[in-house]
């Protein structure tokens, strides 16, 4: 279904049930706002409509109660009924029942992941030093003009290999377990805002968006301490949530 609403004398829409509920939460649609959907004979204030609608426990969108399935005090829209009960059988949290991982828990998980990838990166750097300098040297420096070219090539290769390690680490574990080892240890999972798993494209995008969170003096990470859904900047960019499962 789709909703329409009046704003400043103009008709706005259509908007889907999820977006409509978001407008209600953001205060764009208030009790006095005139709203309409195809099942209505005329436009009515949202305050009159609210009692006849409910938020779907599977999608988070607002639907008419008469078109929904009641279950244990919740309502599930017809199009999301199968999805909801499938998640229930699998023990997966529903979107409106997410418990978000707090800043402290996410920080510890990030440190654990950093230690793991750091060790792997160190081994890779030592291997690169053998390739470019013929010996194991950690972070060699261009002490002579003769090795300046090798040093620059080493630095470039180190950056590329480090990026590949981090990306492969994130992709493998997020795709297979919906969490990196650090997050698994802390009982965290990374999902979409609707509770679905991340696609390969979104995992890759989130990895590079996380670099942005760190570049701006780690402010992108600190946002998780103040956001009501504990979202970092890269969570906002990629529409992801880190939830607590234990």
Image: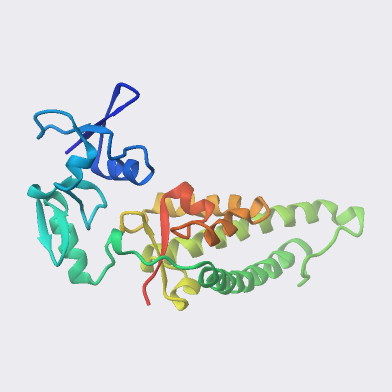
Of the 4 image quadrants, the one containing the C terminus is bottom left
Of the 4 image quadrants, the one containing the N terminus is top left
Give the residue displayed 30% in from the left and 21% down from the top: 10
Give the residue displayed 22% in from the left and 46% down from the top: 62
Give the residue displayed 74% in from the left and 65% down from the top: 129
- 61 vs 156, left or right, is left
Above or below, 86 against 208 in this view is: below
User: 87 or 78: which is nearer to us?
Assistant: 78
- 238 vs 85, left or right, is right
Residue lying at the far right in this picture: please name it: 144
On the image, the x and y values in percent for residue 215 come to 65, 51
On the image, the x and y values in percent for residue 99 come to 37, 67
User: 85 or 18: which is nearer to us?
Assistant: 18
On the image, the x and y values in percent for residue 52 come to 14, 46
On the image, the x and y values in percent for residue 180 come to 46, 69
User: 68 or 133: which is nearer to us?
Assistant: 68
Residue lying at the far top in this picture: please name it: 9
- How many marks are shown on the rendered structure? 0
Give the residue displayed 11% in from the left and 33% down from the top: 40
User: 132 or 197: which is nearer to us?
Assistant: 197
Above or below, 43 against 49 in this view is: above
Res 194 → quadrant: bottom left
């Amino acid at each position: 279904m789709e909703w329409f609403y009046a704003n400043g004398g103009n008709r706005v829409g259509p908007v889907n049930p999820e977006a409509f509920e978001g407008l209600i939460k953001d205060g764009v649609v208030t009790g006095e706002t005139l709203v309409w959907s195809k099942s209505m004979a005329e436009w009515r204030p949202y305050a009159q409509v609210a009692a006849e609608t409910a938020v779907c426990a599977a999608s988070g969108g607002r639907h008419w109660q008469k078109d929904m399935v009641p279950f244990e005090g919740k309502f599930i829209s017809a199009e999301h009924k199968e999805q909801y009960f499938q998640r229930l059988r699998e023990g997966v949290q529903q979107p409106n029942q997410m418990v978000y991982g707090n800043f402290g828990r996410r920080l510890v998980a990030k440190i654990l992941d950093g230690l793991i990838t750091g060790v792997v990166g160190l081994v890779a750097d030592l291997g690169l030093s053998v390739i470019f300098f013929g010996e194991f040297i950690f972070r060699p420096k261009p002490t002579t003009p003769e090795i300046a070219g090798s040093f620059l090539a080493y630095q470039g290769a180190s950056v590329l290999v480090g990026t590949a390690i981090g990306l492969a680490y994130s992709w493998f574990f997020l795709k297979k377990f919906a969490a990196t080892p650090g997050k698994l240890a802390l009982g965290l999972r990374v999902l979409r805002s609707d509770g679905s798993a991340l696609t390969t494209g979104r995992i890759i995008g989130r990895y590079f968006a996380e670099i942005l969170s760190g570049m701006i003096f780690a402010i992108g990470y600190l946002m998780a301490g103040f956001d009501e859904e504990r979202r970092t900047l890269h969570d906002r960019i990629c529409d992801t949530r880190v939830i607590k499962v234990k």
